[in-house]
Amino acid sequence: MDSEVNLYLLRAEDEFLLARNDMRISLEQETKEYLGIQKNKTFFHSVINHAYYSIFYATKAYLYIKGIITTIPDEHLKTYNELKRLAINGIIDKELIRIYETEIIKADSLLKIFKLEKGKRGKFVYNVKSEANLPFAEESINNAKKFISTIKLLINKGE
């Protein structure tokens, strides 16, 4: 397997590990206490972000073995469009594109919240509790796990 593919897969695994650990830190009071983190502090937004990046890098690895290299500018959009093209052409399961789209939407909504709050800075207080992101974070972990394992299987089969 090409070293670039290995690097992308390693990065995908690292991002997934960070997502899983941020989930653990968010949910386990004993872990919070050990790390000196406030009891009510959660990192669900970070779980979603890391899960998305794990999917992104797994996709980059898969595209690379297909001879498709995406670069900046608009690297994320190009990567998504190439994966979608493979799904439309029946080369990969359309379920992978559904997972990717779900995670893009969640990651993108976090970015939109940031932009909105940056614009409102000093005028309003954002009042959504982090716990509201728990179901989305759980879904992101499950999606990333399924996506990465499927991509690794495809790569190992040479598909």
Image (tube, grey):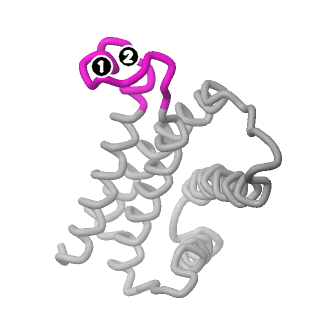
| Label 1 crowd bin: few (<14), some (14–19), many (20+), radius 10 Å | some
- Residue in view at x 48 percent, y 35 percent: 43
- Residue in view at x 34 percent, y 20 percent: 32
User: Observer-nearest residue: 44 or 10?
Assistant: 44
Q: Which residue is mark 1?
A: 31
Q: Residue furthest front?
A: 122
Q: Amino acid at mark 2?
A: Glu
Q: Relative to residue 61, is residue 32 depicted above or below?
A: above
Residue 74 shown in magenta: no
Label 2 element class: loop
Q: Is residue 138 visible?
A: yes
Residue 134 x %, y %: 58, 28
- Residue in view at x 64 percent, y 49 percent: 106
User: Observer-nearest residue: 45 or 119?
Assistant: 119
Which stretch did the figure color magenta? 23-42
Q: Gap in Å between the C-alphas at discs 2 and 1?
A: 5 Å
Residue 139 x %, y %: 56, 35
User: Observer-nearest residue: 17 or 30?
Assistant: 30
Q: Quadrant of residue 60?
A: bottom left
| Label 2 crowd bin: few (<14), some (14–19), many (20+), radius 10 Å | few
Q: Which residue is mark 2?
A: 28
Q: Relative to residue 56, is residue 141 depicted above or below?
A: above
Q: Relative to residue 74, is residue 25 depicted above or below?
A: above
Image side of residue 155 versus residue 75, left or right: left
User: Observer-nearest residue: 153 or 11?
Assistant: 11
